[in-house]
């Protein structure tokens, strides 16, 4: 899937190879998991890069339009005939999140 290298040992790692281990610090109130992803080669904690998360904001208009259509029966992007803009933002957000997704070291774990 994603051909990235481990930040410590420079071996290729992917999401399906990553293991899990309990995190040492107590999670904050907004965190759901007490586990961290671990590189299979060097056993260091890794996470997805921060740049890819910002591209997910481009998915928000399509998601809000879909949610409003499910709740009220009226799509927000259909009112201005902007459905193609929503699909373009959706494609740009998904592809940007995939392309800029890279693994980073997790400090203090």
Image (cartoon, helix red, strand yellow):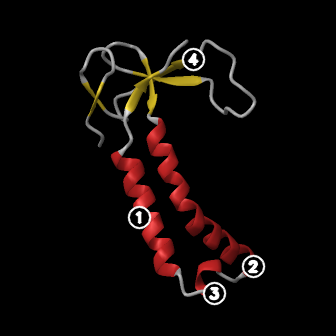
x then y, percent, for residue 78: 59, 85
Real-space Cα separation, disc 2 to disc 1, in angstroms: 25 Å
- State the mark number for residue 72: 2
Real-space Cα separation, disc 1 to disc 4, in angstroms: 35 Å
Categorize mark 4 by other alpha carbons within 10 Å: few (<14), some (14-19), many (20+): few
User: In the rendered view, would you say 51 is above or below 45?
Assistant: below
Q: How many marks?
A: 4
Q: Are marks 3 and 1 in contact (CB under 8 Å)?
A: no
Categorize mark 2 by other alpha carbons within 10 Å: few (<14), some (14-19), many (20+): few
Q: Are marks 2 and 1 in contact (CB under 8 Å)?
A: no
| Image point (68%, 23%), residue name | 27
| Image point (32%, 15%), residue name | 8
Badge nearest the viewer, 4 or 2: 2
- State the mark number for residue 66: none
Q: Which residue lies under the disc numbered 3?
A: 79
Which tag, 3 or 4, sits closer to the chain's start? Answer: 4
Real-space Cα separation, disc 2 to disc 3, in angstroms: 13 Å
Q: Are marks 3 and 4 in contact (CB under 8 Å)?
A: no
Q: Quadrant of residue 18?
A: top left
Element type at marker 1? helix
x then y, percent, for residue 37: 47, 25
Q: Are marks 4 and 2 in contact (CB under 8 Å)?
A: no
Real-space Cα separation, disc 3 to disc 4, in angstroms: 48 Å
Element type at marker 2? helix
User: In the rendered view, would you say 79 is above or below 33?
Assistant: below
- Would you say 74 lies left or right of 109 here? right
């Amino acid at each position: 899937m994603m051909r990235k290298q481990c930040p410590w040992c420079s071996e290729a790692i992917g999401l399906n190879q990553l293991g899990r281990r309990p995190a040492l610090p107590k999670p904050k109130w907004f965190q759901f998991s007490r586990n961290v992803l671990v590189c299979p080669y060097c056993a260091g904690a890794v996470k997805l890069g921060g740049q890819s998360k910002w591209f997910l904001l481009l998915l928000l208009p399509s998601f809000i339009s879909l949610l409003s259509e499910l709740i009220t029966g009226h799509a927000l992007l259909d009112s201005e005939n902007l459905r193609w803009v929503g699909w373009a933002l959706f494609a740009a957000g998904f592809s940007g999140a995939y392309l800029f997704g890279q693994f980073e070291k997790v400090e203090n774990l």
